[in-house]
Amino acid sequence: MDKDIRWKQRFDNFNRAVLYMSKALDAYQKDQKNDLYKLALIGSFQFSFELAWKCLKDFLNYSGVHVSLPRDVIKQAFHHQLIQDGQLWIDMLDDRNLIAHVYDEKKADAAVLRIGEDYFRGICQVHAFLKSKAEHTMDEPVTAWDSGKPHDWTKPVE
């Protein structure tokens, strides 16, 4: 599959996931005692996080930075300024792993608090970045990360 198409197709799924996460967060904030809303928020976070790091991986690969594991993707995305807060993304990865494999109500409640206070903001930041890149036409040069030099996004970043 064409690398350009791959990251954009995955972004379409990520776009929908962020919308569902936003709805789950709104519902949970209106009724925090509702366990179904809490579970919906946790599930939508897991799904959104998974698609976010995979979109970042695809975008990095498309740009010539070859990574595959989530932690490495996060490090490279931070290095190339695709994400603003690297530690926040490492924390998201750790919480995603924790709540995916062990259900402890106190840990789940703490994760839900972080999802609402911090993680949603981080996911929205990546969503906005990728959306801006997806909306550019490929014949229009855009500025490469922080280099200040125009870059033709049809070619990998050097």
Image (cartoon, grey):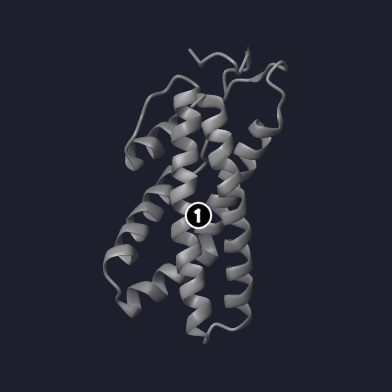
Q: Residue 76, percent across and down?
A: 40, 31
Looking at the image, residue 38 sits to the left or right of residue 71; the answer is right
- Which residue does the image show at 37% across and 48% down from the upper left? 90
Q: Residue 119, percent across and down?
A: 50, 57
Looking at the image, residue 22 sits to the left or right of residue 64; the answer is right
Q: Against 147, is 72 above or below?
A: below
Looking at the image, residue 139 sits to the left or right of residue 10; the answer is right
**Location of mark 1 (residue):** 48
- Which residue does the image show at 41% across and 55% down from the upper left? 92
Q: Residue 156, percent across and down?
A: 51, 16
**Residue 56 seen in render:** yes
Q: How many marks?
A: 1
Q: Residue 140, percent across and down?
A: 73, 17
Q: Against 114, is 90 above or below?
A: above
Element on which disc 1 rests: helix
- Which residue does the image show at 54% across and 82% down from the upper left? 32
- Which residue does the image show at 62% across and 14% down from the upper left? 151
Q: Against 50, is 156 above or below?
A: above
**Residue 80 seen in render:** no
Camera-nearest residue between 51 and 118? 51
Q: Residues within 10 Å of mark 1 (few under 14, many from 20)?
A: many
Disc 1 residue type (three-letter): Ser
